[in-house]
Image: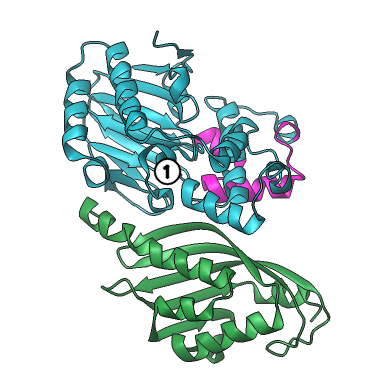
Chain colours: A green, B cyan
Amino acid sequence: MLTVVEQQQELSLKNACVAFMFAYQQKNIDKMMSLCNPEGEVHFTPMGDAGKGKIGELGKTIWTMLIDCFPDIDNTLDAAVAEDEYTVRCQVVIRGTQKKDFAGIVSKGLQFDSDHIFIFHLDDNNKIDSIQITWNHEDFKRQLGS
Amino acid sequence: MLYRKFSPCSTLQPFVECYFVWQSQEDKALLVESPPSGYCSIVFNYGCDYVVKNKKYERLVVPRQFAAGQSIYSYSLSLNGPVGMAGIVFKPAALATLFKLSTFEFTEERIDLYKVLNPSCVFNYRQRIMLADSIEQKARLLEEFAMLQYLQHEPQPDAIDEAANTIVAKNGMLNITELMEGIYMSRRNFERKFFQKVGLSPKYYARIRRIGYLCNMIAGKQKADWPSLLYECEYYDQSHFIKDFEEFTGRTPQQYLQENAELARLVEKPKQQSLM
């Protein structure tokens, strides 16, 4: 059970996560990274072990590739809920039009629109030190014609 | 058990949906469930302590005075003694407009008012509401409390307040393109500002509001004419409806009818009264 004091600690958590999603919407990778510990872990869950790495390395590379391959990529943050005093769950809809091949998916110029869950973990300084991202990858590939 | 609702004065109508007072002297256990309503609130509890259970909390002891943001999921309140609550039900963007609070921080939370507003002011109103002789007097104090905030900030409802209030008025039955007619900002900017002031995206908020409206229509009933309700609530098909219903209430529609313990099962649905 959470106490009221613990609730208060959670309140400031959401700011970094919401700012991260807004920076992603603006395709501002530097801003996204400034909110994170680059040594922290990112896991793009549907990609298995290949989707695990450091935020400042794998994370930065994949988000840069996504922005390059889907130049109109956009997101809508539906909700951000603090799960505990260090964890925030963001429900996000991401959409975009494919212009280049991405992660083995050949570009057919199709669009995707996909619900994503971002689970952010933050350290004591409110820096994001872990991100777990989940989406329906089969449906994502289907929408892109793969 | 007594549950009464009061209308706000015209100045506060853009921000306040209603005031309520809920009282009971009965010293027995009570379970009250509620779907997400689409409103925010400030509540002063002068009765027994109680706990809330929702998707996040198994058993959270609710602060004696709190501000609540948007609920995404159904929740239940467990009370174990005399009930005494007086609260302000706010329009969806009003915590931000009237109190300058970042509403997204309050989504699925009940935050102690002492942490977010002037503690001496909160204490003053909490005591006066507790000691007020009549239900009407408690409601007047709630209005005075809201008016105090209004006079401090002199807020004007902006395009986000109006858009959110339109979603409420249309019970979530509109699309975002329709909603943005006459709003001169990009969709991206609109969604961002809406999130900051309401705590959810406009589309997601509209889905919640629609379910809240539908649940209100079936509150206290044992049977429902589902095809008519789906038609009235403009659901595209049954599977969309069931998906939304289960996501936000945690139950199938039929389970909800059979099991839900809304306040409407305990008290007659109150008519909103004027404070004049």
Element under disc 1: helix
* B272 to the left or right of B211: left
Above or below: residue B96 compared with residue A21: above
Q: For the view shown, which residue lies furthest in the right direction? A: A108
Above or below: residue B102 compared with residue B127: below
Q: Quadrant of the C terminus of chain A?
A: bottom right
Q: Identify the residue position indicated by label 1 in the image.
A: B96
Above or below: residue B189 compared with residue A102: above
> How far across and down, in percent of the image, does residue B52 sit?
33, 43
Specify whether residue A20 is in view.
Answer: yes
Seen from the viewer's position, the closer of residues B215 and B116 is B116
The verdict on residue B18 being magenta is no
Q: How many marks are shown on the rendered structure?
A: 1
Residue drawn 74% across and 37% down? B234
Q: Which residues are magenta?
A: B231-259
Specify whether residue B108 is in view.
Answer: no
Around disc 1, counting alpha carbons within 10 Å, would you say few (fewer than 14), some (14 to 19), or many (20 or more)? some
Residue drawn 24% across and 58% down? A6
Residue drawn 70% across and 78% down? A70
Seen from the viewer's position, the closer of residues A20 and B20 is A20
Instruction: Locate residue A104: give its quadrant.
Output: bottom right
> How far across and down, in percent of the image, does residue A52 sit?
49, 88
Residue type, mark 1 in image: Ala
> How far across and down, in percent of the image, does residue A105 sit?
74, 86
* A98 to the left or right of A133: right
The verdict on residue B235 being magenta is yes
